[in-house]
Structures are given as C-alpha cells and as structure tokens.
Amino acid sequence: MLVAAWLVRALLVVGGLGLGVALGGCAVVPQNRRAHFADPMLRDSDDALDAHRKRKLYTTREAAAGGDGKRAGGGCSCQ
Amino acid sequence: MGAAASSFAFASSRLSALLTVLALSRTGAAADDTFEDAQVLGERSAASVELVQTRITAYDQTGYGYQSQAGPKAGPGSETLHVLQAQGEFVMKQGDNLTHRVWVPVDLVTSASADAIDRYYGKPDVVSRASAQNLAAEVDYQLSVRAGPETTWTGTAGMHYEENFLSWLYSLEYQRSLADDNATLTLSAQQALDWFDAFYLGGQRSGRTSRSTTSFNVGLSQLLSPSTLVAFAYGFTLQRGELSNTWNSVPTVTGERTSEVLPRMRDRHAASVSLLQWLPWEAALELRYRYYRDDWEVTAHSFEGRLRQRLFGRLVLGASYRHHTQTGVFCFTTRSLLLSSYRTADSDLGPLDSDSFGGSAEVTLPTRSYGTLFLTFGYDTYFRTDELRVNIATWASGLRF
C-alpha cells in the first residue's frame, strides 16, 4: 500500500516535470523589452537573508512548511 | 676528399634549408589550426566579489502553549522567548561560469526547553529556566556552475550546530532557461540529516536519536508581458525518524503531564502560485497563494501581498501583509488520554489563523570604487488566533558590486 502511494506520487511529480518541459515556456517578451526585470525591486525572489528570516518565522510557528524550493523541516531543533 | 667534403657541406646546407622551410611551414600551420587554452575554455578573468552583506534580526515572542511546562501543570505554559539572529553572506564570481556563496547564520535564543540538559545543570529542567540561552550556528557553502548558456547547476553543503543537535545539509539544483529566457524551469532536491539528544519529560537525557528530511521541488516561472511574471512551485517532503523535539509535554485528563508522541513518518505537499507586477509609478506588486497538505491531516492556505515603492531614486519603501490558516494535526489535544498512541499539545501544530504586517525601507548609495552600499531596515508584527505574538525588527547592510 505504501509502495503504491509512493509510486502514484512519483508519477505525479514526473508527470508534472514532463508537462513543464513539454510546455517549454512561451516566448512572449523579447530581450529588449525586459528592462523592468533588471530592477532589483522586481526580482522574483527575496534577498536570501531576508527570505531566511521570514522562512524561519513561519516554518517554526506553523505546521505547513515547504513548496518554496527549500527543505520543509529538519536542520534545526525547532522544527 | 675535398670534393666529397664540399659535396657533404652542400647537402647539409640543402637539408638544413629544407628543415628550416618545414619548420617555418609547421609554425604557420600551428598559427592557423591550433587554439590557445583561453580560446577553448573562455577567458579566465580574475575572481570578483559580487556581494557582501550582514543582517541582524531580533524576534520578541510572547504567548502561551499547552506543550510548555513553564506554567500551571494543566497548562498552558509560557512561550516567551527572544531570538537575536546574525547572518553573513559572501558571494564571489570566478570567471564567467562559477559562483561561490558562503552563508553563516547564528541564532542566540532564549528558550524554556532547549537548555534542559543535565550536562550543564545540576537539576534537569524543562520547566523553570525560561531565560536560559541556546546558541545555534550554521555554515553553508554553495557553488553554482553555469554549464551552458541556458543551464546552471547549483550544489550546497552545510552543517548546523546547536548544543544538543547536529545537522548535515545537502542540496542539488538544476535550472534551465526556456523560450529565449522567457521561462525558467528549476528542479531541486534537498537532504537534511539531524542527529540529536532525546530527553525524558523531566529533562534527563535518554540517548541519541535522528531524523531525515528529504525534499523535492519543481518551479516554473514565465514572463507574461514586459511588466508581469508568474511563477508556479511544488514541493514534496518526506520526513522519517524522531519528529518530536522530545521535550514537549502534553497535559492529561488526570491533570498530569506526559510526553509528546508523534508518528515517525510525515509526507508533506505544498504548491504555490505567485504574480509579480511592475507598476508604472516606479512600484512593484507581488501576490502569492500557497496550498499545503500532509498526511498528518494538516491543510493550510496562505495569502501574501507585498508592495514596494521607489522614491527619490534611492529610497525603496515596502509594505507587506500575509494571512495563514491551518487545520491542526490529527493528534492535537490539550487534554490527552494516557492511552493515546499519538499526542501533541504543541501550539504550532494546532488549528490556527495568523496574520502578519510588515514595513521596510532600503537606501542605496553608489560609491566611487566599492560598488553600491545598501542599508535596509524592516519591522514585522505576527500574531495568531491562539494569542501568540512576535515582533520582529531587522536591519541589513552591505555592498553590491
């Protein structure tokens, strides 16, 4: 039963990855029209140290860590 | 003899001339057909520092939870603690393809429970030394390798230390640009191995135990317009081993306290979508929704919004809001039956809603020869429906080159 659940989850992950690769992204914005994305204000990820202190606040006081490209739990006795 | 010598001398000079011509032609061929190392491997520029920064964050928490013994026997006990967190980051680029990053966070924590170690105190105590201090430190080294114009591999290794706790951390990430850099696919895996002391409820050490946390993450970001970006992410985490910190307690129906007991396996899923929008008045808006579910019956939803506004060219003001709601784990209780196989009274694992408001200000000042100096100050307040409250002040400074 446990193995079957694992297989289903693995298939879901692999399927999701395949879908992402198959979509291959859409080229809608040419290089010379991306000036705003060079602005640090519009970066799609926080400053790493600021992100760490926020993650620490939420993951150690709530039961729902994960999904942000980092490990969800572990590595600290407060989790 | 003289004629023979003359003939030999003539033949020698002819041979010498022929060798010279061959050598010259070979030299010419070398100039045309071979390449220097730099032509093959790329110009090897000197290492350059990209970023140096430090950040200090202070957390001031008040509240009560039934897992804490710092209060009436039937609970709840105090969850008051203070944390002073210092972080340092150093990023260096080596040539065009290598980026090194060293990150060192250090947490100085006052806590009711982590110092309940009989090694240091005559009387083991999980109850009364709420102001005892605990020092936690970590060192992470990260190496990013640009393997091609569209592909980057990043590996990280780290180690975390607390007085009764050691962790080893590893991760590997693959990032690929798609569709002329309009989209980015990121795949990553993380592994944490924790090795720590286990305690009886009275604070005596019962031995060593361990926990393994393995995470797999996938993310896809896509430009929708010259001012809009959308990103999706999914993470799957498997935890195995001792998932309690072993010193949490649970009040019982008889008015006593017993140990927290949690399952030794936990599978967690989290998915999020975020939108990043440039606004025409020199501002940026970020909206994010996150869904979480695990096999301990926790379901959670988180909404987050952040607005940043540039003023006078050098000042960026930010405001943020986050709302989180979660159901409790299946074995959460504040009055446990002693016969229960699994039980916890940890307020973090109970049903709750939380809200947080934040504000920040960042000033950037270009220097003549040391890059751009930046100074940031931020303040957040976080409060939950179970009365736990945290005030956070943070300030950072550094140089971007």
Image (cartoon, coloured by chain):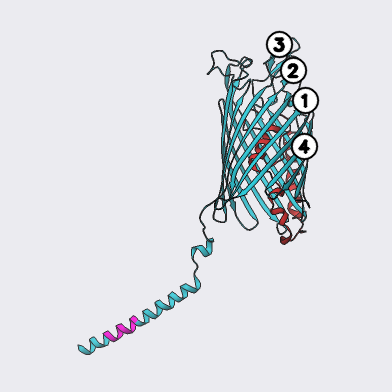
Q: Position of residue B382 (x, y in %)?
A: 74, 30
The image quadrant of residue B169 is top right
**Part of the protein shown in magenta:** B9-16
Calculate the distance from the C-alpha at mark 4 to the C-alpha at mark 3. Answer: 40 Å
Q: Which residue is mark 1?
A: B330
Calculate the distance from the C-alpha at mark 4 to the C-alpha at mark 1. Answer: 29 Å
Give the left or right position of residue B122, taking residue A27 as reference.
left
Q: Would you say residue B74 is visible in this rendering?
A: yes
Q: Are marks 2 and 4 on the same chain?
A: yes
Q: Position of residue A18 (x, y in %)?
A: 74, 50
Contact flag, marks 2 and 4 (Cβ < 8 Å):
no
**Chain given the colour red:** A
Q: Which residue is mark 3?
A: B256
Contact flag, marks 2 and 1 (Cβ < 8 Å):
no
* Residue at position x 72%, y 49% in the image: A42
* Residue at position x 64%, y 22% in the image: B246
Q: Which residue is mark 4?
A: B321
Closer to us: A57 or B329:
A57
The subunit letter for the residue under badge 2 reads: B
**Chain given the colour cyan:** B
